[in-house]
Amino acid sequence: MSAINTFNAFLEENYPRLDSKIDFFNKTMLQEAPEGFTRSMSYFTHINSGGKMLRGVLANMGYYIMGGEGDIDYSDDLAMSLEIFQSSILIHDDLLDHGNTRRGKETTHVRIFNEFNITNAKVLEDSPDVMKDLVNGVSVALGYVGLYEAYNKLLSAYSDNPNIYRLLKEYNHMVIKTVEGGIMDVVIPFSERYKDQIPVQSPINADPFVVIENLATLKTAYYTTMGPIVLGMILAGATENQTNAVSEVMLDTGLAFQIQDDLLGIYADQDILGKDVGADVAEYKQTFLYAYVKANDEAALDELNRFYGDNKIDASGVKAVQDIFNRTGAYQFAHDKMEFHYKRAKERLSKIDFIDDEGKELILGFIEYLEQRKK
């Protein structure tokens, strides 16, 4: 069996169980919601379903490859915690990015807006921000609810585990780094877009490639690849040296994953992607694609900036951006960098000696699974 097939078999074995438990969690959240809060909670459970469960399955995998005691189900509460955490930050991310679709359905803030939308002209004239305040307030608060529900699940499930202190410490580290990345993901595009109008120097003027790599590490690698598998390993009693070695593999994998995500955000089929293609352009997102054009072709950058920040960018605009990235070499640069990190991840994995062949095959399969994704 090939490595990717080995991982797919592991995914197919664990996904249905986790999906069922997330479904039960959602139903319980709605049933136990205080009177008057059920409708609001439904906006969270709406987004807390339909995911690929990759982070949860990675937690299961980290526990499994370290020979976790007993049934792999023991790591399910950790897996669920990560999935609930993922849903929470997606609510915040989609709000900040003005995303309309997520997991093939309305984002949380869009659903809230559609259900509460006030069209009375007099009301809107007297209180022009009334809908914005409602949508922002509920979305942010729901994200907080999810974050603490995720943390509570860890405490409830593993209070007797001898590794609980290190587990929670690593979990908190992952959350903090992810939030730092989220802040950078807002500040950096703003600073670049309005660099001539604000008194502080744009962080992207330092070394754009270093800044973008730091951003990708924080906002993606920590909670998409590194955090989940490391937390699973810690639950099973892995040493710090062991988790550090796997973290290096997963760091490269996470960087490649984010670059690939940036490429898909411009070049993917929107029906397959499940979210808006071109949203990164509308939000002035800073990627290796943009940084390469900025560093190498001033005229092309001026042309690119005719489209960046356009909230109404259409298919022809996305095609024009693609053409700029293609002819300047930005696409090839980003693609080559993605390939480099995937390759180095595999090389680092091959040097690990404390994981058996089956475990290394699972990790390799996960890397290959990400390489071939289209969404």
Image (cartoon, rainbow, N blue to C red):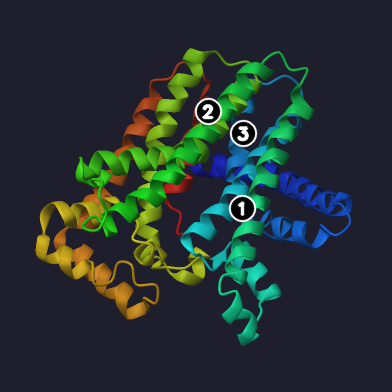
Q: CA distance from mark 3 to mark 2?
A: 16 Å
Instruction: Please say if 328 is above or below 29.
Output: below
Which residue is label 2 attached to? 173
> How far across and down, in percent of the image, does residue 35 sit?
89, 56
Q: Earlier in the sequence, mark 2 or mark 1?
A: 1
Q: Which residue lies under the disc numbered 3?
A: 59
Q: Residue at x 88, y 53 (%)?
A: 31
Q: CA distance from mark 2 to mark 1?
A: 21 Å
Give the amino acid at mark 1.
Val
In depth, the one of 14 and 91 nearer the eye is: 91
Marks 1 and 3, how far apart at CA: 26 Å
Between 318 and 272, the one nearer to me in the picture: 318
* Residue 342 can be seen in this image: no
Q: Position of residue 245 (x, y in %)?
A: 43, 20
Residue at 61%, 53% in the rendered image: 140
Q: Are marks 2 and 1 in contact (CB under 8 Å)?
A: no
Q: Describe the element under mark 1 as helix, strand or loop.
A: helix
Residue under circle 1?
140
Give residue 25's position: percent from left, percent from top. Answer: 79, 47
For marks 2 and 1, give the one nearer the viewer: 1
Dots 3, 2 in contact, CB < 8 A: no
- Is residue 231 left or right of 310 when viewed as pictured? right
Between discs 3 and 2, the one toward the N terminus: 3
Residue 292 appears in the rendering: yes
Question: Mark 1 touching mark 3, by CB under 8 A?
Answer: no
Q: Residue at x 46, y 45 (%)?
A: 182
Q: Residue furthest bottom?
A: 121
Front of the two marks 1 and 3: 1
Please, is residue 4 above or below residue 303 in the view? Answer: above
The residue lying toward the viewer, choosing from 130 and 18, is: 130
Kind of residue at badge 3: Ala
